[in-house]
Image: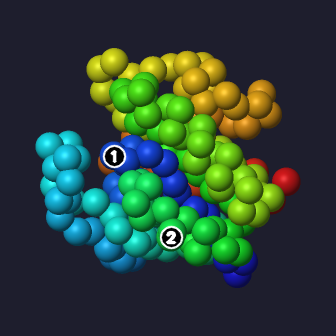
Amino acid sequence: MPAYKIIVTGPFNSGKTEFVKNGSDIPMVETEKNITTEDRGIKASTTVAMDFGRMEIDDDTVHLFGTPGQTRFSFMWEILASEMNGFIVLVDSTDTPSFPEAAELIEQFSGFVDVPYMVVSNKMDLEGAASTDEVRSETHLAADVPVLEATATSKESVRNVVKEMLALIKR
């Protein structure tokens, strides 16, 4: 049974932890700590090292590693990117000011290892969500990079994204 390592990265509060948790077939391993900075008003806790989940899709095992979103924990990014088969950049489609940060993450992770990647526009179920065309434009993506819609709180939505990522890796 082939195993694949997929990194889930994105700006702070883009939904990485929810994505890994709802995609995982096992209880997610998480490293959440209470937020002590000015970001406290946005949410109560943040990932400080990684989130880990595992899922089975057909005959494949997928290891999902969620990265911390805050740059103060960026030392973990290269560690997690080691031996990855592909990466997903999760974007909060309702937070357009975070799109340039997503573009920087694409550049950074592309520099670690040359692997396929995609951008996933999360929170598409919320009012004020940007279209995938807006996400593509604001993250300066090439035409051949997939941009998918998702809702990280939906197991089916997450599984569909991971299936697409596996297809991209296997090409």
Q: Residue furthest bottom?
A: 1
For label 1, the crowd category at 10 Å Cα-Cα, with few meaning under 14, some 14 to 19 and many 20 or more, is many
In the rendered image, residue 115, in percent from the top left (x then y), is placed at 77, 58
Q: CA distance from mark 1 to mark 2?
A: 17 Å
Quarter of the view holding residue 78: bottom right
Circle number at residue 76:
2
Q: Is residue 6 left or right of residue 21?
A: right
* Callout 2: SS: helix
Q: Residue furthest right?
A: 171
Q: Which numbered disc flags the more N-terminal residue, 1 or 2?
A: 1
Circle number at residue 129:
none
| Residue beneath the point at 69% across and 59% down | 86
Which of the image's four quarters has the C terminus? Answer: bottom right
* Callout 1: SS: loop
Residue beneath disc 1: 13
| Residue beneath the point at 70% across and 81% down | 1
Count of picture labels: 2
In the rendered image, residue 138, in percent from the top left (x then y), is placed at 58, 24
Question: Front-most of 7 and 53?
Answer: 7
